Amino acid sequence: MPNTFAPGDSVTLTLTVRSPSVRVGGTFITTGGVGALQALPGEGLAQGAQGLTHTAPKAAVDGAVTFRFGWQAPAKPGAVAFRVLALAGNGNNASSGDAPGTADFSWAFGCTARELYVDLDRDGYGAQNLGRRLGCTDDAPPEGFAPLPGDCDENDEGTHPGAVEVCNGRDDDCDGQIDEDVAPVMMWPDADGDGYYPGQTGESKLGCGNVPGYAPNPGDCNDTDQATHPGAAEICNNRDDDCDGQVDELVRPQCGLGWCSRYSTTCDLADCRPGPPAVETCNHFDDDCDGEDDNGACSTGSSCSGNECAPVTGVAGSEPQTAGSPSSAGGPAQAGAGGGSSSPAPSTRSTSGCSFRAVGEHSAPWSALLLSAFVAIARRRSRRERQHFMS
């Protein structure tokens, strides 16, 4: 409240976490430094370096856990995306049966809004199914977002609407057709018929994937196995399935927790040996390998906020004039954030709605910062790389 606001205005938001089995809930809220978040008295939230987090599990009322918090918009026109990490706990004092989830809620203020789409490959086009947020028409999109939709492959910057279609067996311009109206290219013998040739040897022919026994793409490292070629799925079989020069990378059995996690030297779990534990530090990671992130990293009376220890006591903020009512529907692990209306003007609020469904199961016990486990989701790639390095 209010549902729409101008630069410099203060608003009160209500976040609701729902799940059929919810008994208690927790949350972490951040805007990435845009505007000023405020912890309101009696809401069970505390202010840290990165945002707001619950000080203790909060009891559910009528199947929902509700948090109110304040936020002041910057003085200049712009956009804000509230990233919410939440957990609905079933109250059994264990991690089993708990339901986590994450969602973004975005607003634009003092400007004409436009939708922005997730652009992982930074080619200027985003994919509608990967998430979206609001931005200002006159502002450059934030990193990782683009104003143009329609990308059909966010792993390839050369694939997007308007790209030049080339002879490669792929839909380069995202129009639903493959290799349409392209000029023929030199093709070389492809013994296993997987679309890749091992080298420019033998007789070549002109074409575009339409000459039996020939292929337009290089890089096959085993021309007797149709399942082995660049881009193939790597499986644990003591072979280089994707022709990247590595064998069974990131697919061998794993053992150990956190920092101790290692890949087996073979495809047999019995050959896996965990690494040694380290001293637990405040970094959203399980350094001492006991299955919990950051436990014991901070002294009594403080907990991890971002990458530093901060007091767990709440920070007082101004009381709201009126409390907003979320409009998220009930259901498994949902959360809503909003003001007094569930249907704000498109120029001020994300059209993606204000509810989300659980995406997994929590794997660590309750603590003042149990949501650090969800922050780790965003660090999944870096952890994979770390584990690969340690293997």
Image (cartoon, helix red, strand yellow):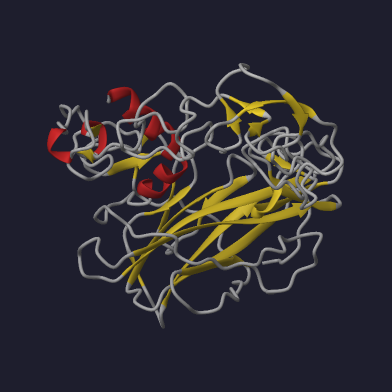
Q: Is residue 25 left or right of residue 116?
A: left
Q: Residue at x 63, y 39 (%)?
A: 120
Residue nearer the viewer, 321 or 156: 156
Q: Is residue 133 left or right of residue 297?
A: right
Question: Where is the N terminus found, in terms of image quarters?
Answer: bottom right
Measured as percent of width and height from the top left, residue 42 is found at 42, 64
Measured as percent of width and height from the top left, residue 262 is found at 24, 32
Measured as percent of width and height from the top left, residue 30 is found at 53, 47
Q: Which image quadrant for residue 380?
A: top left
Q: Is residue 221 left or right of residue 168?
A: left
Return the residue found at the far bottom: 62
Q: Which image quadrant for residue 324?
A: bottom right
Measured as percent of width and height from the top left, residue 157 is found at 70, 33
Residue nearer the viewer, 165 or 209: 209
Please say if 268 is above or below 56.
above
Return the residue found at the far left: 270
Q: Residue at x 63, y 68 (%)?
A: 321
Question: Where is the C terminus found, in terms of image quarters?
Answer: top left
Please say if 1 is above or below 108.
below
Return the residue found at the far front: 203
Please say if 186 is above or below 383.
above
Q: Residue at x 77, y 59 (%)?
A: 348
Q: Residue at x 61, y 16 (%)?
A: 201
Count of numbered badges drawn on the protein:
0
Q: Which image quadrant for residue 98?
A: bottom left
Residue nearer the viewer, 12 or 321: 12
Q: Is residue 14 left or right of residue 270?
A: right
